Image: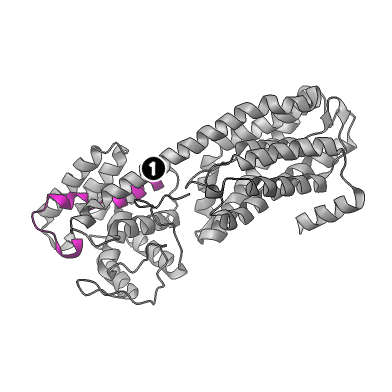
Amino acid sequence: MLGCAAIVHCLVHGIAQPGIALAFGVLVAVGEAARGPAAPGAREPAPLGTAGVLAYALLGECAGRATTHGTLQVVLVVLAATLAGAVARPARDRRDLPRELPGHLARRTLVAAFAAVCFQPLHASGTPEGPAAGAGYALFLLLLLALTALCDTVLRAAFRRSRTGFPYAPLLRDELRALPSIGSAVCATGVVMALAVTVAGLWALPVFSLPLLLTQLSLSRYETVRTTYRQTIASLARATEIAGYTPPGHARRVAALAVAVGRELGLGGTDLTVLEYAALMHDIGQLSLVDPVPDGATAGLPAAEQRRIALLGGAVVRQTGVPAAVAVVVERQADPYRDQPLTARIVRTVNAYDDLTGGTARESGVGTDADSGVRSGARRAVTAPVALEELRLATGRDHQPEVVEALARVLARGVRARAVPGPGRARR
């Protein structure tokens, strides 16, 4: 609706100062075209485009001459430039475009409109130098920057809530914790870019664009390395499956469902990464067994044997270079849940659920319906409600009640979580 209003407005009134609009539109389009593949956890994949959007929304003068574009023109330029940049991306990076673009475009448009609505009317009603002069003007822009960043954080959490079904409060906390990272630097660069254009004109755009473009390319390479690292860990986790110690897909199912339960319980950031890696490699210690345990379910082994397997698994994990907290989670799997960290409790409960159901969750995502059946396996599998009831009965020593109930809520909502990428399945 906002985009349609912007199109109608510009058709009726025309484009104000088309040269300035074109310059910022090209800047946003280039930033969008240079955007790398969307990686898990990447908060700001297109810093150059975002900075250009904010700079245009907060632009009051160009080389000492007052600008006359309004909020709706800002919306139109952002829409057109983002779409043009998305189409210009390499074909290999456009595979997920139909799924990613609507949310990305909507959030970027709303954030640009918010910044423009806060700035443009105040600037137009103030003195020719803006709502304030000198240092006061810069402070005004910084205050507006903080409000815009907060607006973006709230919208990002809302879009993630609608896409994943996770509770909004933990997602918002996760986004607030990530706010001081690259996003705040990009927003500050947008403000500085607007101030530079005010003094030096459009020639300031390429001066500020080159460092951001190099930063964007570096971020893209970093995310590629992270994805490869995660795939390496997933490949290592498959060693128990290839050797016949655990059922096929068990580690990836446990990891995907554990992350969903972790988000349900309010975990975020590094804690979720530790949880995912530990869930992938929680069975690695079974490679020390002479004979595989049926279906990889070690719960029936003596406590001393469970403890030995967990300690050997932790020792292997420590050699992989992952954070030490991952090894701690693996080592503590055989402890009573009251002695375990929360991440270890989640892995233990989700692992038990997958053992009981025989792997109801599909690799394409977590989201087993609470009343669904299960596929047959080497041993008799039970339905999801029966498995949950067995877990509830074991809360005296083996499982924390809050974790079991969080698992039940995730399954009841049919939450879909991205599967952990395996060998040959690069996630983009």
Q: Does residue 279 show up magenta in the picture?
A: yes
- Residue drawn at the location 41% of the way across and 63% of the way down: 366
Q: Main secondary structure of the magenta part?
A: helix
Find residue 393 and report its image quarter.
bottom left
Q: Nearer the viewer, residue 83 or 295?
A: 83
Q: Nearer the viewer, residue 281 or 426?
A: 426
The residues colored magenta run 272-297
Q: Nearer the viewer, residue 117 or 17?
A: 17
Find residue 403 and report its image quarter.
bottom left
- Residue drawn at the location 42% of the way across and 55% of the way down: 265
The residue to which callout 1 is attached is 228
Q: Outermost residue toward the left? A: 290
Is 304 on the left-hand or right-hand side of 172? left
x, y (%) of residue 233? Answer: 31, 45
Which amino acid type is marked by label 1?
Thr
x, y (%) of residue 242? Answer: 22, 56
Is 119 on the left-hand or right-hand side of 45? right
Report if residue 106 is visible in the image. yes
Q: Quadrant of the N terminus?
A: bottom right
- Residue drawn at the location 52% of the way across and 45% of the way down: 37
